[in-house]
Amino acid sequence: MTSRELLYVKTIADEKSITRAAQKLYLTQPSLSHCVTNLESQLGTRLFRRTSGGLVLTYAGEKYYRMACEVLRVYAAFEAEISEESELVRGRITMGITNYLACDLLPRILPRFHREHPGIELRVVEETSEEIQKRLLSGRLDFAVMHTGAGEDEDPGLAHEVLRRDPFLIIAPPDNPHDAQAVRREGDAYPELDPALLSGEPFLMVTKGQRIRHVTSRVLARAGFAPQIVFTSRNYETLRRLASEGMGYTLVPRQYIGILGGSEYKTCCYAIPPRYDAYWELSVVTLKDAYLSRAAKAFLQSFREHIGEV
């Protein structure tokens, strides 16, 4: 049975007349009668019986009528909801993002987006890059904002839209002996230090599998040495603070400096020469050829505009 047949039976029952129902439905009386006859034949039972007061529902017809009313109500509500979604009055987005990116970006993006589209619900899943990729591939996320290009193989089932390139810095203890070897250029925020000069120095590393670790390992391999790792942590800010206490050196994304505060922990920060490719890329990641709702597209457009302003 179709929504059209449901509407036909409901209208006939409401009007108690095929003629009046046909007029209301903008159909001819014979075509509406034919449709009802075919439907009754398919169901194997009569839906209407004739009385002096007009057409009335049989027992089966009453059940069909109640079902038709409910289905048409649900369908109408669905159409209204889809219409609101297309007009960005309502909607829901499920996005993935890493913890540090959420801390850095969401407070600067969400308030404006919420003011512009208060009826759109945003569900944020804060997870590791590895877990976010799994959820994207399983279809549990509309999209993700994450770092890519860290040296590991990207899944061919995912599409990446690179928004910007974020460089890494060398974080060194204050008063470290390599400060005099750093190259200072007028106008540069940080002096440049060749990581090859750090061979033999103690290193503080994030855990294996984290993308900061991938970038750090790539840079140090190009510098020609394997690091002497004295401490490992999942938290880059822990490593930065330990570096301030003279425990060793670490690499941190420039964009992350200062996100978690801790300004009392003073370190020396150095840029890395371009030949080391010491960067990762901020990307919007989606399942290849995945459908994106208008709400998701609106959020991503707002996100792109914000990134373009930074």
Image (spheres, helix red, strand yellow):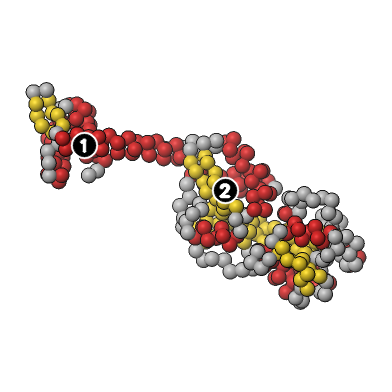
Measured from the top left, where is residue 196 in percent x and y?
Answer: 80, 72
Q: Looking at the image, is 185 positioned above or below residue 109? A: below
User: Which residue corresponds to mark 1?
Assistant: 63
Give left or right: position of 204 versus 2: right
Residue drawn at the location 82% of the way across and 75% of the way down: 200
Instruction: Kindly tell me whether residue 136 is visible in this rendering.
Output: yes
The three-letter amino acid code for the residue at tag 1 is Lys
Give left or right: position of 163 versus 123: right
Q: Earlier in the sequence, mark 1 or mark 2?
A: 1
Q: Place residue 161 in its image quadrant.
A: bottom right
Q: Say which element carries label 1.
A: helix
* Residue 124, numbered circle: 2
| Label 2 packing within 10 angstroms: few (<14), some (14-19), many (20+) | some
Q: Looking at the image, is 204 positioned above or below residue 261? A: below
Q: Place residue 4 in its image quadrant.
A: top left
Measured from the top left, where is residue 35 in percent x and y?
Answer: 15, 40
